[in-house]
Amino acid sequence: MEALYLTIPMAMCIAAFFLYVFITAFRKGQFEDIESPKYRMFFEEEEYPQNKAKPNQTDGPTSKS
């Protein structure tokens, strides 16, 4: 019986925390569009050119004799 005095308030605090997180995410618009992300993989994306980095100047022998 004594364990209930500790576990019930802890459970209520945890539930209140997750309710707060859910309400915060809902207000920020996290759940507005739940349908289109699962269909996004079917659309073709444009291929962007890869950024080609300049060759590293430190490649090769580094000793200056």
Image: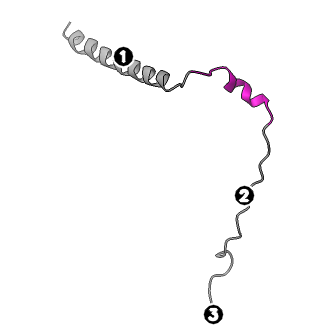
Q: Secondary structure at mark 2?
A: loop
Type of the residue with mark 3: Ser
Q: Is residue 33 magenta?
A: yes
Q: Residues within 10 Å of mark 1 (few under 14, many from 20)?
A: few
Q: Is residue 21 left or right of residue 34?
A: left
Alpha carbon of mark 2 to alpha carbon of mark 1: how far? 48 Å
**Residue marked by disc 3:** 65
Alpha carbon of mark 3 to alpha carbon of mark 1: how far? 70 Å
**Residue marked by disc 1:** 15
Indicate which disc residue 40 carries: none
Q: Nearer the viewer, mark 2 or mark 1?
A: 2
**Residue marked by disc 2:** 51
The image quarter in which residue 52 lies: bottom right
Type of the residue with mark 1: Ala
Q: Nearer the viewer, mark 3 or mark 1?
A: 1
Q: Is residue 15 magenta?
A: no
Q: Say which label, 2 or 3, has the lower sequence index.
A: 2
Point 36% across, 22% down: residue:
17
